[in-house]
């Protein structure tokens, strides 16, 4: 999920609040729809890259973590 703050009252307080609430973007009104859509595409691409990086890291850790092997699995 991405969070973009759209505001018609650009104040320092609003900008600080957006950062503190971990907003991914901050857009001032009136805005150009194409600019907003490009920002959404860019942010979604960043989130996808982050997901793929984390997924790859988990897969690597899974592969490199020693598994417990039973000496005689037929006894179970």
Image (spheres, rainbow, N blue to C red):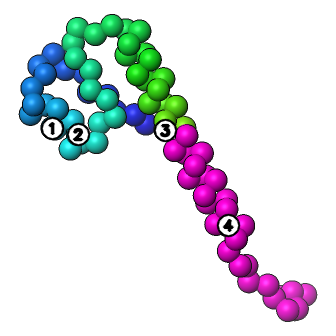
Q: In which quadrant of the rendered view does residue 30 lie?
A: top left
Residue 36 left/right relative to 69: left
Picture coordinates of residue 35, whole percent (x, y): 38, 13
Q: Residue at x 15, y 16 (%)?
A: 8
Q: Determine the CA span between mark 4 and mark 2.
A: 34 Å
Q: Which mark is residue 16?
A: 1
Q: Residues within 10 Å of mark 2 (few under 14, many from 20)?
A: some
Mark 4 or mark 3, which is nearer the start of the sequence? 3
Q: Callout 4: few (<14), some (14-19), or many (20+) C-alpha neighbours within 10 Å?
A: few
- From the viewer's perspective, is residue 55 above or below residue 61? above
Q: Magenta segment: does it hold 43?
A: no
First-in-chain label (2 vs 3)? 2
Quadrant hosting residue 68: bottom right
- 5 or 38: nearer the viewer: 38
Q: Main secondary structure of the magenta part?
A: helix
- Indicate the quadrant containing the C terminus: top left, top right, bottom left or bottom right: bottom right
Q: Which residues are magenta?
A: 49-76
Residue wearing tag 2: 19
Neighbours of disc 1 within 10 Å: few (<14), some (14-19), many (20+):
few
Look at mark 3 in the image and give the residue it sits on.
Answer: 47
Q: Are marks 1 and 2 in contact (CB under 8 Å)?
A: yes
- Locate the N terminus and report the quarter of the image it occupies: top left
Q: CA distance from mark 4 to mark 1?
A: 39 Å
């Amino acid at each position: 999920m991405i969070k973009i703050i759209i505001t018609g009252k650009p104040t320092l307080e609003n900008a600080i609040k957006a950062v503190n609430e971990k907003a991914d973007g901050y857009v001032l009104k009136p805005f150009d729809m194409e600019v907003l859509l490009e920002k959404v595409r860019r942010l979604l691409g960043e989130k996808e890259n982050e997901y793929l990086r984390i997924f790859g890291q988990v897969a690597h850790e899974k592969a490199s973590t020693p598994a417990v092997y039973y000496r005689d699995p037929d006894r179970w």
